[in-house]
Amino acid sequence: MTDRGGASHPLVELTLARFREFLREPEAVFWVFAFPVIMTCALGIAFRSRGAEPVIVGVVQRDGAAALTATLEAAGGFSVRPIAPAEIERALRDGRAPVVVVPGAPPVYRFDEARAESQVARLAVDRALQRAAGRQDAFVAEERPIDTIGSRYIDWLVPGLLGMNIMGTGLWGVGFSIVQARTKKLLKRLVATPMSRAAYLASHVLSRLLFLAMETVVIVGFAWAVFGVGVRGGVAALAVLALAGALTFGGLGLLVASRARTIEAVSGLMNLVMMPMWVLSGVFFASSNFPDVMQPFIQALPLTALNDALRGVMNEGLSLAALRGELAILLAWGLGTFALALRLFRWQ
Amino acid sequence: MNHVPTDSPALACRGLVKRYPDVVAVAGLDLEVRRGECFGLLGPNGAGKTTTIEILEGLLDQDEGDVEVLGRRWRTDRDELRRRLGVQLQETQLADKLTVEETLRLFRSFFTDGPTVTELLDLVELGAKRASWVGKLSGGQKQRLAVACALAGRPELLFLDEPTTGLDPQSRRQLWDVLGRFRAAGGTILLTTHYMDEAHALCDRVGIMDGGTLIALGTPRELVASIGAAHVVEFAVEGAPPADEVLHSLPGVRDVRHRDGHVALATSELHATVPALLDRLRQDGAALSLLGTHSATLEDVFVSLTGRHLRDD
Ligand SMILES: Nc1ncnc2c1ncn2[C@@H]1O[C@H](COP(=O)(O)OP(=O)(O)O)[C@@H](O)[C@H]1O
Ligand SMILES: [Mg+2]
């Protein structure tokens, strides 16, 4: 065994040093752990499944309003809001009610044709009123609603948030600490020892893996406990993806930080790198919303590959073999950026 | 420790030149440091000390000139040299949120031979602080830690760039003790400083640097002797002091300098100069407002060579 005077292998010591420094930085801990949990919680509540929610109907307060309200309440599935006659258009505009019924014979429906929600509410009100007035349906179809776990917005959202977090903490965690070491001349000091430069860079990526294991457990565990979001493809596959993501964005973080001399410069660069991916890579809404001409570019982005793969494992239960295309994109980015960073790196 | 005494110097450079766009930081420097000695580069801010030492440490490339360290060259033996040298840089800030012990473990891990972490802690007397965060240490403790990091690989040659700048007298003395122990074990030191007393206390030989070149070289004693005046008489009078020619003609006086209204006379015969000066002032009817004497120092050497002081403060 090599004598290191009580110290471990340099790669271990470097990684531990990074790990300790991070844990002793309360702000960093907040951004990595608390922030994604708060975000998941807020979005989960904002976009919680509305399948069983009542349709909101505005009823204009004039003759017949009481009877109309009673009819709708008897039909079930409606939440009636009284609307003053002068308020109809404002109520529609500000979203207080997607449809407003003016009592009368026949009644008048006021709604917004351009909004799907408004259209649906109008149909539901019409059906209830027609039936109450005696209309017989020609047939009654069997209804099989899906509200199974795995197909709600929150199920789709959580993998995207996880991907976004892996990207954000990878870039920030690596980029920030490297530029800090550079401005404090610590890099220069390290270069004056026999330390292997590759080991130094690798320790940043490795320490990301440690945090990442914790981040993933916190985010996925929280989403599972609170919203019942599952991991259909198994925890092992999820772990492999998270590792691949940490390598990818750790490498990208090294590259972004490879020449920057100030914290401001590296922050700007990181935002420049992350911003397009927040928008394009399907974090909050599907990347398929963008035009076809952009798709080859979007699909080549590392966050798109990571999000698609995470959704494949968590929502669809795909195996890693089925996701080898995404994995290949991630590894290519990770290794490519690491190699480039090692060549470009400014040590002083 | 096993420092084989050899004929090759610990360090040698010839014709060293480093140019920056608007200044020539090192302008043709020749230097030789012998094994086992403590060599001091003494000079004011901007003299080119840091640039020189970083070239010797293999951290900067020179534009011209030759460097040989421990008989090796940076271009061909970089890895070996990194293992055999200890370096403390002027501006490094170690990670604030690691403890003293963690920091030393990290640096120790880069070397396959050297003292244990505990031995390093004892060497710089930081054992009681082993669990403190680096950010919580005093300036003197930080500098001792920086030196301990430089000693982690049991170096043969230790480079120190202004190791005691900004420290209080007690902290400086503690650091000098650490360096004394390193030397006692046979180590060689090259240090830079702009404190003349530090150069006096620590260095076997001193090179005085100004404007990127050496303007004097020798033991502190030789350098002080070279100005031909063992003492300095400093005085001030109310009104105008006697003319320089008059002062020069006083017995023993070798040099006359003015600074901030004070006059400094470098003299080889203190016992003759002082009475003669007092007589002269009495004749002129000048009222003495200050009189003092001290043994000539490296500061006086620098003043006599350049007409300036080492430090502006
Ligand atoms: N990286 C640099 N770029 C431009 N000028 C520099 C650089 N480093 C040092 N200098 C200049 O070179 C001269 C010598 O600097 P330095 O070696 O740091 O002196 P010292 O250590 O003796 O104070 C100074 O005039 C300084 O401004
Ligand atoms: Mg300097």
Image (cartoon, rainbow, N blue to C red):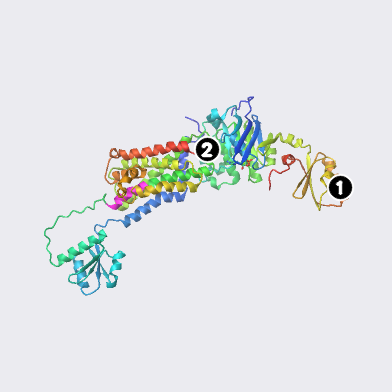
Between disc 1 and disc 2, the foreground one is 1
- Residue beneath the point at 29% across and 68% down: A89
- Residue beneath the point at 11% across and 63% down: A136
* Chain ID of residue with mark 2: A
Picture quadrant of ligand 1: top right
Amino acid marked by disc 1 = Arg
Question: Label 1: which residue?
Answer: B280
- Residue B245 visible to an observer of this rendering: yes
Left or right relative to A266: residue B179: right
Q: Can you say whether A100 is above or below B163 in the image?
A: below
The picture places residue B308, in percent across and down from the top left corner, at 72, 43
Residue situated furthest right in the rendering: B283
Q: Is residue B46 magenta?
A: no
Magenta span dominant secondary structure: helix
CB within 8 Å, label 1 to label 2? no
Q: Is residue A159 magenta?
A: yes
Q: Which residues fall within the magenta stretch?
A: A152-164
Amino acid marked by disc 2 = Leu
Neighbor class of circle 2 (other Cα within 10 Å; few <14, some 14-19, many 20+) is many
The quarter holding residue A51 reads bottom left
The quarter holding residue A302 reads top left
- Check residue A310 in the rendering and tell me which mark sits there, or answer none: none
Q: Specify whether disc 1 shares its chain with disc 2.
A: no
- Residue A217 visible to an observer of this rendering: no
Left or right relative to A252: residue B161: right
Quadrant location, the N terminus of chain B: top right
* Chain ID of residue with mark 1: B
Measured in 3D between alpha carbons, the distance from the residue under mark 1 to the one under mark 2, in whole angstroms, is 62 Å
Left or right relative to B127: residue A270: left
The picture places residue A74, in percent across and down from the top left corner, at 19, 66
